[in-house]
Amino acid sequence: MILSMPLSKKLLALTISMFLIVLGSASLVVADTAQPDFSNENCLSCHAEVGPFITTSVHSDFTCLACHPNIGSEHLQDYRADYEKPAETLISPQHIPETCGACHAEELDSYMESVHGRGLLLGSIETANCIDCHGSHNVLERSDPQATYSATRLPDTCAKCHGGEAQENFIKGTEHKSLAAGTGIAEHNTLKFFVWLTILTVVGLIVHMEVELFHLFKRSGRKKN
Ligand code: HEC
Ligand code: HEC
Ligand code: HEC
Ligand code: HEC
Ligand code: HEC
């Protein structure tokens, strides 16, 4: 069609289409530089299931990004039906302690000293991390009877993994006990005592073996002569 037009009309058509292309790409640029919306409202527009919990949680004043700092603008743009979760994120079991510990340094330290923290260090993801005892979006104050770590619910929380009936005595210990802390000084010294005892025993054993080997070689050397 354009080919059959007279030259002046061809030029006019070309100019108009150039103009439209420039206009079109300009509006694309504007859309691209619009600030990504990281508000909780925007997150909740897709993740509505989180809403009911986060409003009653002790963390309700925080933005979602406080615990999900790895969620970037691509997450908002790249939403596709075939979105694939990254294999490992800050909310994978092995990373949850550092994610929560960013604000709860003391509890992180005492957790890492506990059986569960040591289990996690050894690579166990079946062991308990922060959210197994506290929940993730629904963390409540301890005095709230609904809290998973309240005095009333704690036995059931432990029993999830420690089988059978919730045992009264099992939960009597303090969960976050720092062995270096004031009240834990006796335990701290006991721990140190046994650590040094082990080191000295092993060193003693090795020295003993070396000495014996030395004598053995000396004796066999003498026999040959
Ligand atoms: C346009 C919809 C949409 C918006 C807006 C959105 N998400 Fe998502 N998000 C998804 C989809 C889809 C998935 C993958 C499916 C799933 O796990 O639910 C996902 C997965 C996630 C995950 C789990 C996987 C991962 O990468 O860790 C987190 C955490 C998450 N979103 C947090 C957020 C936060 C925080 C915001 C707000 C800054 C947000 N999302 C905004 C659609 C959205
Ligand atoms: C106090 C920290 C914290 C805050 C605040 C928080 N989250 Fe999470 N979120 C977590 C943890 C921990 C997990 C992992 C839960 C699990 O593995 O069961 C998680 C998991 C998720 C998932 C993935 C669920 C799945 O099944 O994979 C989405 C989606 C999500 N959060 C969205 C949000 C949104 C939206 C907000 C804000 C309204 C928010 N989170 C605020 C800690 C938090
Ligand atoms: C951005 C900082 C931040 C992050 C990340 C965070 N918290 Fe908190 N958390 C707080 C603050 C601040 C309070 C105190 C709120 C209050 O007293 O009202 C709190 C309170 C709590 C309490 C209740 C303590 C009490 O005295 O009642 C628990 C339990 C808790 N957080 C566990 C977690 C867990 C588990 C995670 C990870 C899923 C986490 N927190 C992540 C800042 C954070
Ligand atoms: C998510 C599962 C889970 C929860 C919840 C849990 N534990 Fe454990 N716990 C484990 C695993 C797994 C081990 C084995 C050592 C390891 O891998 O860390 C363990 C080990 C222990 C041990 C060392 C002795 C033993 O049986 O191996 C004690 C004591 C313990 N847990 C107490 C508790 C208490 C108290 C609670 C509740 C406040 C609790 N656990 C909640 C998974 C859990
Ligand atoms: C095995 C269960 C268990 C695990 C795992 C656990 N906690 Fe706790 N947490 C408790 C219990 C029980 C309490 C109540 C006080 C106590 O016994 O020390 C508590 C108390 C707290 C408190 C409130 C302290 C206060 O002064 O009232 C915070 C904050 C907290 N934990 C954060 C964390 C964080 C962060 C992690 C992970 C690094 C974590 N917890 C792992 C069971 C657990």
Image (spheres, helix red, strand yellow):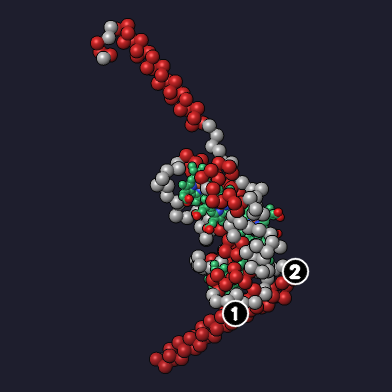
Between 208 and 96, the one lying in front of the other is 96
Please name the amino acid that badge 1 sits on. Thr
Mark pair 2, 1: CA separation? 25 Å
Residue at the right extreme of this rendering:
182
- Residue 154 image point, x, y percent: 63, 69
Q: Is residue 157 left or right of residue 181?
A: left
Q: Tell me the number on the disc at residue 198.
A: 1
Q: Tell me the number on the disc at residue 182.
A: 2
Asked if one can make out residue 201 in the rendered structure from this viewpoint, the answer is: yes
Q: Is residue 24 left or right of residue 197?
A: left
Asked which secondary structure carries label 2, the reply is helix
- Residue 145 image point, x, y percent: 68, 64
- Dot 2 or dot 1: first in sequence order is 2
- Residue 66 image point, x, y percent: 60, 49
Q: Tell me the number on the disc at residue 96.
A: none
Q: Is residue 6 above or below residue 22?
A: above
Q: Is residue 184 above or below residue 131?
A: below
Mark 2 or 1: the one toward you:
2
Q: Is residue 220 left or right of residue 42?
A: left
Q: Residue at x 44, y 55 (%)?
A: 87
Between 110 and 1, the one lying in front of the other is 1
Please name the amino acid that badge 2 sits on. Gly
Asked if one can make out residue 102 in the rendered structure from this viewpoint, the answer is: no
Asked which secondary structure carries label 1, the reply is helix
Tell me the crowding category of disc 2: few under 14, some 14 to 19, or many 20 or more residues within 10 angstroms, Cα based. few
Q: Residue at x 65, y 78 (%)?
A: 169
